[in-house]
Image (cartoon, rainbow, N blue to C red):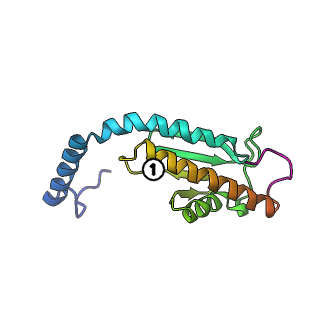
């Protein structure tokens, strides 16, 4: 079944707003920026893999996720009650960055206008946030005393 007829479907004001957005995207070169800065963001986020709990960084360009794990070798997840994604997000927010926690993941879907300087600041904040979250996980006995916490 195809349901149509929603309040804003094909509404002239919605269409005008969409067309204006497309005009701005083209004029400002936003797609070109994503193609240029996106791979840089991916590369920089992968440097966070030095943290004990960062098991994977995946996604593409400006839609990325950082997976938090208890064990990098086995990819075993931390228990749900550890709320690892929430811990990282809270530590990032203390430092001025809002990221979205989803279970054991931290999701980044940033504004498409980020440049390399912003990426560098964001990754520096995330580096601190992961270090602080790892320390709190260890203090709450979710991580062993071994490993290479950064």
For label 1, the residue is 109
> How many circles with numbers are drawn on the protein?
1
Residue 138 in sight = yes
Where, by quadrant of the figure, is residue 132 drawn?
bottom right
Q: Position of residue 78 (x, y in %)?
A: 74, 54
Where, by quadrant of the figure, is residue 11 drawn?
bottom left
The residue sitting at 22% across, 40% down in the picture is: 26
The residue sitting at 63% across, 47% down in the picture is: 67
What stretch of residues is rendered in magenta?
143-150
**Mark 1, other Cα within 10 Å: few <14 / some 14–19 / many ≥20:** few
Q: Position of residue 104 (x, y in %)?
A: 64, 53
By secondary structure, the bulk of the magenta-drawn segment is best described as loop
The residue sitting at 45% across, 50% down in the picture is: 109
In the rendered view, tell whether residue 30 sits above or below residue 5. Answer: above
SS under mark 1: loop
Q: Give yes or no for residue 13 being in the magenta stretch.
A: no
Q: Position of residue 37 (x, y in %)?
A: 42, 38
The residue sitting at 86% across, 52% down in the picture is: 145
In the image: residue 86, left or right of residue 78: left
In the rendered view, tell whether residue 11 sits above or below residue 109. Answer: below
Residue 104 in sight = no
């Amino acid at each position: 079944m195809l349901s149509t007829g929603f309040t804003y479907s094909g509404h002239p004001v919605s269409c005008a707003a969409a067309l204006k957005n497309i005009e701005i995207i083209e004029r400002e070169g936003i797609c070109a920026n994503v193609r240029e800065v996106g791979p840089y963001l991916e590369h920089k986020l992968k440097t966070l893999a030095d943290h004990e709990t960062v098991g994977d960084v995946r996604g593409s360009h400006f839609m990325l996720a950082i997976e938090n794990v208890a064990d990098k070798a086995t990819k075993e997840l931390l228990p749900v009650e550890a709320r690892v994604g929430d811990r990282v997000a809270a530590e990032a927010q203390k430092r001025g960055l809002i990221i979205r926690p989803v279970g054991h993941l931290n999701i980044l879907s940033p504004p498409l206008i980020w440049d390399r300087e912003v990426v560098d600041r964001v990754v520096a904040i995330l580096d601190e946030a992961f270090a602080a979250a790892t320390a709190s996980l260890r203090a709450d006995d979710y991580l062993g005393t071994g490993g290479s916490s950064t």
